Image: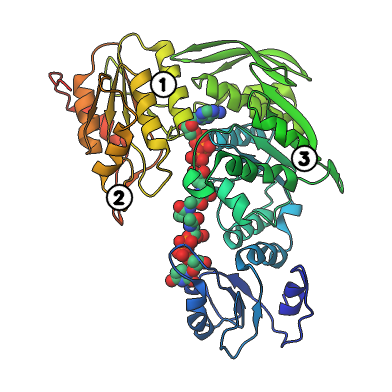
């Protein structure tokens, strides 16, 4: 594609009078630049991409997009915000891939990964080729690519959509983080369906206040545009039981489908029954009423199922196909995943790392625990500090015994993080601090008795622990299995 054509896509457009060159690729990382690349300089949190422009030129870049003039012998186009410009440029460079497939975006504090996998399962049951972009990975058909972010930055994102179009993906399902919405990573995306799961405290280190966090998530619904755009109807699927949905209802011009358990909604679950083996409920939808028997456990998974049913209805998928798919889903890795090594107590690994999700997970466990409930929980370093005391408070209030431990301390001192957590605990409560996560899991497993449940919260599917700048192998599920295998049941916590 020619540079001039690309630049014309930027608004407000200042006529480009420089040399026109052919752009063969578009990159924001100089290490990926090859002959004919357009290099976009992005000011990051750790380094400034402008510092790599000279190297990008030496590696073959034929033009640069920057926020200031740079002394290079190739065209340097100066824009106000290179991050936003990169979204538009990448969308245009890859020939608007999201207009060529159906795109479902899911936002909310909890449930994005689970809901996206449920929607994916439904679409597959309806014989559609799908793509997924989210916290666990990017998946095109059955091919997996690793990801660093829940929502990748724009250049990677549009490249992935382009690959999906080339591989004839019918529908892409993606998690849309509030960070991505604020930073404009998804500026070039044409959504057909936007799903809202819920809003509770998280990421205040980034957004500052809950009001700003709520506004950030709302951007997905304003991005939906009008109810009809060309041939495509646009839908917003909103959780009516969450107050934020009322605001999103007023800012979107799309068709609205609501779901819920408590408040009246288009799609509702009633008569919910939860056991250790699954969850059943009566489903009421505009397409009919039916009993659903999930293998997944917990009221929160009823919400995730309702959200996915909303997306399926908006995608014109017959209800029986949707229910058949949902009833088959065993679960999503690291989300309420059971570790079974023949023991007579339960061990559940769950990705609950927000106060709300921890509370939900513990309340679910309590529905079927026959004896004590232990929770092993920590809080990440270099992330929202305000949730630390809350996490410990909920752990101690809801569980019979809480073990506070490390969870990706990153650059922070694990003991300091645990002290922040401990501030939320009342003195007489039942808890102990074991900074080493492996030791915390092993000692709790040794302590457990028949009918107890151990909830290992926070890391879910993750297979690492970030300590300082080291990324060390660590998988709660494997550590728990090993501990069960070598169990000495004489420990007193
Ligand atoms: C705070 C934040 O959002 N950071 C993101 C950001 O990193 P950064 O600002 O540190 O980038 P940087 O390393 O300074 O680099 C700046 C620029 O220089 C370029 N560069 C850099 C080095 C080099 O040698 N050459 C070079 O060209 C980089 O490609 C980049 O364009 O850009 C990186 C590349 O896109 C992201 O991976 C990184 O996300 C980090 C991992 C992160 O933790 N982000 C969190 C806050 C986040 O976005 N989370 C949300 C939600 C998660 C949830 O829901 O729980 C998400 O969507 O993931
Ligand atoms: N609808 C829900 N409401 C509240 N809690 C939920 C819901 N769905 C899942 N959870 C809890 O949140 C945890 C994370 O779930 P999931 O990975 O689906 O959410 P997410 O929004 O993708 O999280 P993240 O943004 O951190 O990747 C689960 O392990 C479970 O404890």
Query: Residue at coordinates 70% horizontally, 57% vertically from top-left?
Result: 188
The residue labelled by disc 3 is: 252
Secondary structure at badge 2 equals loop
- In the image: residue 105, left or right of residue 286: left
Mark 2 or mark 3: whose residue is earlier in sequence: 3
In three-dimensional space, the C-alpha distance between marks 1 and 2, rounded to whole angstroms, equals 27 Å
In the rendered image, is residue 144 in sight?
no
Q: Is residue 50 above or below residue 371?
A: below
Secondary structure at badge 3 equals loop
The residue labelled by disc 2 is: 412
In three-dimensional space, the C-alpha distance between marks 2 and 3, rounded to whole angstroms, equals 41 Å
In three-dimensional space, the C-alpha distance between marks 1 and 3, rounded to whole angstroms, equals 34 Å
Secondary structure at badge 1 equals helix
The residue labelled by disc 1 is: 362
How many tags in the picture?
3
Q: Is residue 369 above or below residue 419?
A: above
In the rendered image, is residue 341 in sight?
yes
Image quadrant for the N terminus?
A: bottom right
- The percent coordinates of residue 92 (x first, y second) are 72, 65
- In the image: residue 330, left or right of residue 310: left
Q: Quadrant of residue 215?
A: top right
- The percent coordinates of residue 29 (x first, y second) are 51, 70
Mark 1 or mark 2: whose residue is earlier in sequence: 1
Point out which mark residue 306 bears.
none
Query: Residue at coordinates 20% horizontally, 34% vertically from top-left?
Result: 439
- In the image: residue 170, left or right of residue 138: right
């Amino acid at each position: 594609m020619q540079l001039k054509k690309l630049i014309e896509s930027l608004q407000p457009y200042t006529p480009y009078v420089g040399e026109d060159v052919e752009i063969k690729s578009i990159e924001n990382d100089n290490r990926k630049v090859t002959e004919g690349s357009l290099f976009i300089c992005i000011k990051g949190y750790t380094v400034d991409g402008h510092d790599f422009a000279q190297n990008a030129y030496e590696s073959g870049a034929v033009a640069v997009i920057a926020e200031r003039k740079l002394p290079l012998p190739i065209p340097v186009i100066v824009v106000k915000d290179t991050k936003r410009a990169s979204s538009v440029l990448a969308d245009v460079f890859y020939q608007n891939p999201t207009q060529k497939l159906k795109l479902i975006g899911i936002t909310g504090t909890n449930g994005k990964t689970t809901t996206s996998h449920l929607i994916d399962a439904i679409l597959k049951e309806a014989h559609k080729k799908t793509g997924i972009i989210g916290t666990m990975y990017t998946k095109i058909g059955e091919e997996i690519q690793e990801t660093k972010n829940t929502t990748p930055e724009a250049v990677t994102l549009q490249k992935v959509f382009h690959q999906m179009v080339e591989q004839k993906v019918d529908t892409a399902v993606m998690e849309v983080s509030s960070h991505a919405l604020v930073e404009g990573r998804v500026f070039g995306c044409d959504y057909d369906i936007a799903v809202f799961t819920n809003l509770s405290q998280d990421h205040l280190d980034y957004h500052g206040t809950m009001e700003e966090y709520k506004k950030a998530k709302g951007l997905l619904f304003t991005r939906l545009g009008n109810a009809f755009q060309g041939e495509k109807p646009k839908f917003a699927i909103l959780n009516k039981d969450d107050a934020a949905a009322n605001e999103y209802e007023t800012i979107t011009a799309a068709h609205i489908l609501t779901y819920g358990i408590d408040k009246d909604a288009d799609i509702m679950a009633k008569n919910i029954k939860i056991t250790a083996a699954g969850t059943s409920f009566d489903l009421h939808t505009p397409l009919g009423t039916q009993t659903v028997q999930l293998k997944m456990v917990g009221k929160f998974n009823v919400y995730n199922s309702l959200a996915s049913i909303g997306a399926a209805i908006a995608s014109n998928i017959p209800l029986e196909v949707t229910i058949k798919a949902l009833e088959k889903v065993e679960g999503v890795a690291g989300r309420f995943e059971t570790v079974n090594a023949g023991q007579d107590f339960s061990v559940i690994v769950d990705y609950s790392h927000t106060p709300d999700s921890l509370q939900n997970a513990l309340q679910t466990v309590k529905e079927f625990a026959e004896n004590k409930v232990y929770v092993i929980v920590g809080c990440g370093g270099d992330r929202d500090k305000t949730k630390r005391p809350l996490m410990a408070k909920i752990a101690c209030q809801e569980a019979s015994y809480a073990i506070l431990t490390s969870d990706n301390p990153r650059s922070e001192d694990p003991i300091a993080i645990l002290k922040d957590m401990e501030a939320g605990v009342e003195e007489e409560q039942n808890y102990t601090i074991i900074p080493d996560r492996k030791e915390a899991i092993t000692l709790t497993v040794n302590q457990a008795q028949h009918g107890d449940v151990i909830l290992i919260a926070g890391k879910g599917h993750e297979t690492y622990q970030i300590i300082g700048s080291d990324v060390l192998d660590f998988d709660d599920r494997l550590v728990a299995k090993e501990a069960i295998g070598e169990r000495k049941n004489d420990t007193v916590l």
